[in-house]
Image: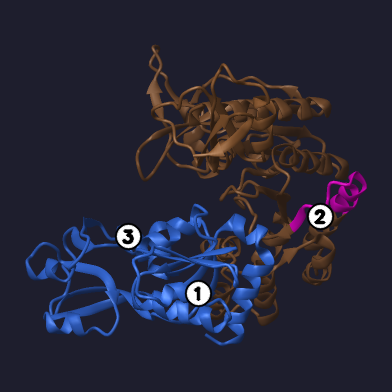
Amino acid sequence: MNSDQIISNSEEADLLLLQQLYASYGYSKFRMSKFEDYTLYLQNKDFLKDGNIISFNAPDGRLLALKQDITLSIVKNAGDADAPHRVYYIENVYRASDDTNDIREIPQAGVEYVGKMDTYVLSEVILLALESLARVSDNYILGVSHMGLLRGLLEKTGLDRTAQREILNCIQNKAAHEIRRICEKNCVENTLAAQLYTLSTLYGRPEDCADALRSMAVDAATRDAVNELFAVYALLQETGHSENLRIDFSVSNNMKYYNGIAFQGFVDGTPRSVLSGGRYDDLMRKFGRKSGAIGFAVYLDLLGVRDSAESADEQILVLYDPQNVSGLAAAVQSLQRAHTAVHALENPQPDARYSRIYRYQEGRLILQ
Amino acid sequence: MIHIALPKGRLGEKAYQIFKSLGYGCPEIEQDNRKLIFVNRENDVCYFWAKPSDVSVYVERGAADIGIVGKDILLEHGSDVYELLDLGMGKCRMAVAGIRGKRPPADRTLRVATKFPNIARRYYASQSREIEIIKLNGSIEIAPLLGLSDVIVDIVETGTTLLENNLEPYETILPISARLIANKASYKFHYDEIRRISEKIQEKGI
């Protein structure tokens, strides 16, 4: 088995589980073209995670781009109908790496809800995020924050957008010492500076962070944000899926487009977030839509990296004589553990590497 | 087990002494041997030395849970890691320097030799100044002396090297010091341990 096979097989298994999950909550599959008008990305360049757009000319002269982001395409096509729009997608996006100029095809699954917002809808999407992570790993964490509280505190500083973004970056990187420096330099009032400092270091179960967050919510906007966060958490607790949820304000999105709950998912063994999402009513407004919207994407390529690394940990070879296979199946089974692959072969494959090699002889496994 | 990436050189050795004083010692690393990775199962810790500019790559990609790195490297590479503490060690500054007594030309594109093209580009963009970056990998100070560039953007510690080569710092871009960084996923799955290390360092007042 080569590593490509491992990745694609595991991605397919993850995909199937996720499709079943999203369909079971009444989300319908949304299929998109691989191409998008270049102008869509050009006009919303600061929304994109990666600024490099891969463009080309269509036969009729129009400038097109390989699809780089799914949310933008869904928002562009979403109407303002009364009925909510629940969709999921499984698509590839295409991005160019800054460092190497490589073009990468990145498989993504995701969920988008467009329509009237309420606490149930918010908790449903976050529950789907939690369940998505649970489908692909036993050990996962969903970090959750609220852009309403972040924005509220940053606006209270009275600093310009550039300085606010600088503080937001520090919160995203948990660089509390830098927040102190920026606040001192810009004469931000002490209580507010201390709140921003606390927000950057805050991490834990929602009940453990409740007092700190409520003490920061001193006006209508920030109070609404904190109340919404805990109302959603209360609903999630009823489902029994809230154990792996953590308050973490390093999880935040672009302030220009995201306005509500923001979240990122991590699974043990993968160095980056494998899921990212949030509420983006302000992006909808930019497209002239009145509805609210919330969604997330799961980065399937990162899950593939995790699985291939784990599978590569233990590749065990069992050499056997086809004339003498009595008891072999049970012997192979006895070697199988989590993250191991046992290859029973008559002869070793020339290019393959194994962490251990056994020979099955006279009903016994003999380590070579 | 916590995996720690240390930068080769004086800063890394000093950083290891801090970890050791906090109870994360690893006798193997103190021995004269050719090993690359050092494990102490008793303290549940694993160290390895890396080129200073690579430490943030190891941490960002999860090969190390935490690491010690200069702020210059973080700013240059824009690494997606948590920057938990300013260790206050390895203090220096990122500065623009050039030939002593000579001012950089204001009437044409400024030629800037540097190991830090991103920092230089951002600094001059903030001043709306048009520049040409000349990316070098070492001995930056020679560039203005040989007419390769008008100025250099580089780390200045004491300024002695500049002085000895008839150069002087013109402007300070920003102060630099060593930072404790953590991988964003590791921070969550090893929260108690990483938090404990970070708090112990803070308590020690380092």
Mark 2, other Cα within 10 Å: few <14 / some 14–19 / many ≥20? many
Mark yes or no: residue B102 visible.
yes
In reply to whether residue A247 is colored magenta, the answer given is no
Q: Position of residue A93 (x, y in %)?
A: 53, 30
Q: Quadrant of residue A186?
A: bottom right
How are the colours assigned in the image? by chain
Mark in front: 3 vs 2: 2
Mark 3, other Cα within 10 Å: few <14 / some 14–19 / many ≥20? few
Q: Identify the chain drawn in brown.
A: A
Q: Quadrant of residue B85?
A: bottom right
Rendered position, A94 above or below B182: above
Marks 2 and 1 close (CB-CB < 8 Å): no
Identify residue type, mark 3.
Ser
Q: Which residue is mark 2?
A: A229
Magenta-drawn segment: A231-246
Q: Residue at x 16, y 75 (%)?
A: B103
Identify residue type, mark 2.
Leu
Say if labels 3 and 2 share a chain. no
Identify residue type, mark 1.
Cys
Total labels: the figure holds 3
Q: Position of residue A301 (x, y in %)?
A: 55, 35
Q: Residue at x 63, y 34 (%)?
A: A287
Alpha carbon separation for disc pair 2 and 1: 44 Å
Query: Which numbered disc, 3 or 1, marks the residue that appears first in the sequence?
Result: 1
SS for dot 3: loop
- The subunit letter for the residue under badge 1 reads B
Q: Which residue is mark 3?
A: B128
Mark in front: 2 vs 1: 1
In reply to whether residue A244 is colored magenta, the answer given is yes
Q: Which residue is mark 1?
A: B26
The colour chain B appears in is blue
Q: Position of residue B192 (x, y in %)?
A: 69, 68
